Amino acid sequence: MSKSFIYTTFFLLFITQAANAQFLLKGRIEFEKTVNVHKQIEIDNNDWYSNFKNQIPEYNHSYFNLSFIGNKTLYEPGRESKEKSSPFVDNVASSNIIYNDFSNQKTVAFKQVFDESFLIMDSIRQYKWHLTKDTRKIAGFECRRAFTVIMDSVFVVAFYTDEIVSSGGPESFQGLPGMILGVVIPRLYTSWYATKVQLEEIKETAITPPKKGKATDYQGVDKAIERSLKQWGKWGTKYIWQIMI
């Protein structure tokens, strides 16, 4: 068998695989956010809350949409959950809207903190991701596992696919070589997983930054939250983590 025949065969195989591969440039992803409410109550170690543990669902679910086209993404609240609301569930980050422009490395985020609304305008956060060889399938996509540490001590696991070109993800998580379809924060007993990826015709005009809220940057909102919650002890720290993700 000649070398030219072998080279030609490998070349044809490469072309066939490339043609069959899907590289998505635009669309919409639904994420399901899951919080283990019982575990969060245990974190608080509050006997009054613990007495109600058996009267509330173990998990709370909420939904968000991530639209993406080219180098822009928009993460915002999605469909309403059919679950009954519970007074024991923190609705932290339930109204978050996060716009990322990767070409200019700029982010604009709306965050509601108690009665105050913040409009954060800053550079896109830089995460020091560590890639692993572990994989899992999410919403039909083969995803690779990565991890990082945020806010000095909060461990974060992410699963990303290079079949979706954008390097975005839920909340402010991004910066991997492909779209993040899963995030787990064990310390908060919280996860985000894509339930479906829709190939939709997304117009650039549909992906625009939020506009309402008190203008600030990440450092400014961090200081404002710490001033408000510094007397709340361990629960206040947990609340800050949830707000600043």
Image: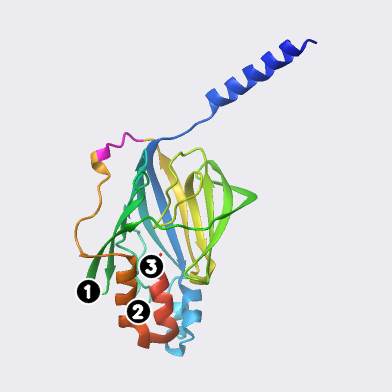
Q: Quadrant of the N terminus?
A: top right
Query: Looking at the image, is mark 1 or mark 2 earlier in the sequence?
Result: 1
170 left or right, relative to 184: left
Location of residue 71 (image quadrant): top left
Write down the region rendered in magenta. 200-204
- Magenta stretch, main secondary structure, is loop
Q: Is residue 202 magenta?
A: yes
Distance of label 3 from label 2 (alpha carbons)? 11 Å
The numbered disc on residue 100 is: none
**Residue in the picture at 50% in, 80% down:** 43
The numbered disc on residue 244 is: 3
**Residue in the picture at 64% in, 18% down:** 11
Residue placed under numbered mark 2 in the picture: 226
Residue placed under numbered mark 1 in the picture: 115
**Type of amino acid at the residue the image marks with label 2:** Glu
Q: Nearer the viewer, residue 111 or 125?
A: 125
Describe the element under mark 3 as helix, strand or loop: helix
Query: Looking at the image, is mark 1 or mark 3 earlier in the sequence?
Result: 1
Q: Nearer the viewer, residue 26 or 196?
A: 26
